[in-house]
Amino acid sequence: MKLSTRARYGTKALLELSLHWGKGPVLLKDIAQRQQIPLPYLEHLIRPLVKAGIIKSARGTRGGISLLKSPKEVILSEVIQLLEGSIAPVACVDNPELYPRSDICVTHDIWVEVKKAMDRVLESTTFEDLVLRQKQKWNLKQLRDRQK
């Protein structure tokens, strides 16, 4: 299963907001620059996230975007579902009636297992988890750089 650019960029943008949680709004241009997301694409991604109540947008000199909830309350599966839709590897997983043989098809069973495994990972991962992982990676990089 390959996630779309929309889901990957949306996740990166929310990670950036999570890294700045409690520090006020973040400018879209700053997120775009730090996460290497084209600004027009990022502007397009923000709308559904605002509409879903995940982030808020403020205009003006102190404007920008910020999370409406703490990063520990924002679950990765919620964001992926919003931006990507179903992550089922094949259509018959979500709609077995589309494939009359799904009840006797062994590959259908495998695709269902794949989706369940992906769901477990995404549903058990919060943006606080991603922040912690990001900070660990930064710390490891700093250690490696000092050893050079």
Image: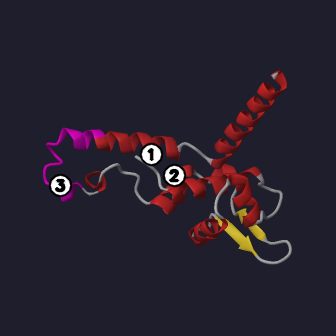
Disc on the earlier residue, 1 or 3: 3
Magenta run includes residue 92 = no
State the CA–CA distance, disc 3 to disc 2: 26 Å
Q: Nearer the viewer, mark 3 or mark 2?
A: 3
Q: CA distance from mark 2 to mark 1?
A: 7 Å
- Per the image, the residue denoted by label 2 is 77
Q: Residues within 10 Å of mark 3 (few under 14, many from 20)?
A: few
Q: Is residue 95 above or below residue 144?
A: below
Seen in the picture, residue 118 relative to 92 is either above or below; the reply is above
Specify start and end residues of the magenta stretch as a single range: 96-110
Residue at the (31%, 44%) spot, across then down? 112
Q: Which residue is mark 3?
A: 99
Q: Residues within 10 Å of mark 1 (few under 14, many from 20)?
A: some
Pointers 2 and 1 in contact (C-beta within 8 Å): yes
Indicate left or right for 16 with 45 as reference: right
**Mark 3 and 2 residues: CB-CB less than 8 Å, in contact?**
no
Q: Which residue is mark 1?
A: 119
- Name the amino acid type tagged 3: Tyr
Q: Residue at 46% across / 41% down in the picture?
A: 120
**SS at mark 2?**
helix
Locate residue 139, reporting x and y percent.
77, 32
Q: Which mark is residue 133?
A: none
Element at label 3: loop
Residue type, label 2: Ser
Name the N-terminal-most of marks 3 and 2: 2
**Nearer-the-camera pick, 36 or 27:** 36
Query: What amino acid is labelled 1 in the image?
Result: Asp
Q: Position of residue 61 (x, y in %)?
A: 86, 75
Q: Residues within 10 Å of mark 2 (few under 14, many from 20)?
A: many
Which residue occupies the extreme top position in the image?
147
Residue 50 image offset from top left, x and y in percent: 62, 70
